[in-house]
Amino acid sequence: MKWHYCLAWFGIRNVFGFFKMGKSSGLENIPTHGGVIIASNHISYFDPPILGSYIPREVHYLAKWELFKIKIFGSFLRSVNAIPIKRTVIDRQALMESLEILKLGKALLVFPEGTRNLRARLLPPKLGVGKLALEAGVPIVPAHIANSQKPTRAFLSGKPIEVKFGPPIPKSWLEQVPKDKEGYKSVVAEIMQRIKKLES
């Protein structure tokens, strides 16, 4: 791990552990090596660092490009493996960078809904995640996070942040899906169905 990433990872883990602010399950579903996509719902700005702190390996993640406008903050995000992505268009640069990360055998955290969603129902997913998964040919681990909107409330209310990781969608399943628009739809539909199963 990069030292800044490692420092942030240990810092968040230790704070959450000491104050009993969070709990996780299904960590055994995350491959210890090789390219993998971890696909989660998205309810808070805090989701990337929280999820990253529970994933037992270094992870890269996509973040909206607007966050990189402030030079110092953008440099920090890059230092902890953030990849800028434009959400209003098909950002080929972000997809190419993400694909390269996966082909190098690294982990990538994505939010298929494409934005934060404060509603009880999941938003329709973006097809880019399906395209990325089929091009990379790596397993996809569904994830679900709850109660992360205000981390301090997890300590004060006794209602901890919950992070769950489900069984991966295997490469063998993806290999049967065509690499076209209908295939992308099939992949993201499967991802969202598996994320929904983790809600309970």
Image (tube, grey):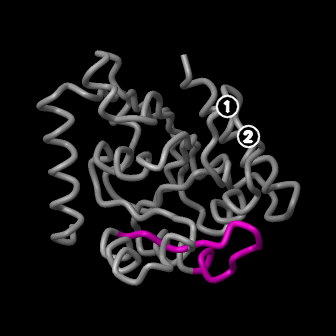
Q: Classify residue 76 by image quadrant.
A: bottom left
- What SS does tag 2 mark? loop
Residue 123, numbered circle? 2
- Circle 2/circle 1 CB separation < 8 Å: yes
Q: Residue at x 47, y 60 (%)?
A: 108
For the residues labelled 2 and 1, the Cα–Cα distance comes to 8 Å
Residue type beneath disc 2: Leu
Query: Quick one: which residue is furthest to the right in this view?
Result: 182
Q: Which residues are magenta?
A: 81-96
On the image, the x and y values in percent for residue 88 come to 75, 68
The answer to whether 148 is drawn above or below residue 23 in the figure is below
Q: Is residue 98 left or right of residue 150?
A: right
How many labels sit on residues? 2
On the image, the x and y values in percent for residue 129 come to 67, 58
Residue for badge 1? 119
Q: Residue at x 28, y 55 (%)?
A: 57
Residue type beneath disc 1: Arg
Indicate yes or no whether the magenta region holds residue 86.
Answer: yes
The answer to whether 146 is drawn above or below residue 102 in the figure is above
Closer to us: 41 or 193? 41
Q: Is residue 193 left or right of residue 38?
A: right
Q: Residue at x 18, y 61 (%)?
A: 6
Indicate yes or no whether the magenta region holds residue 186.
Answer: no
Q: Residue at x 38, y 30 (%)?
A: 26
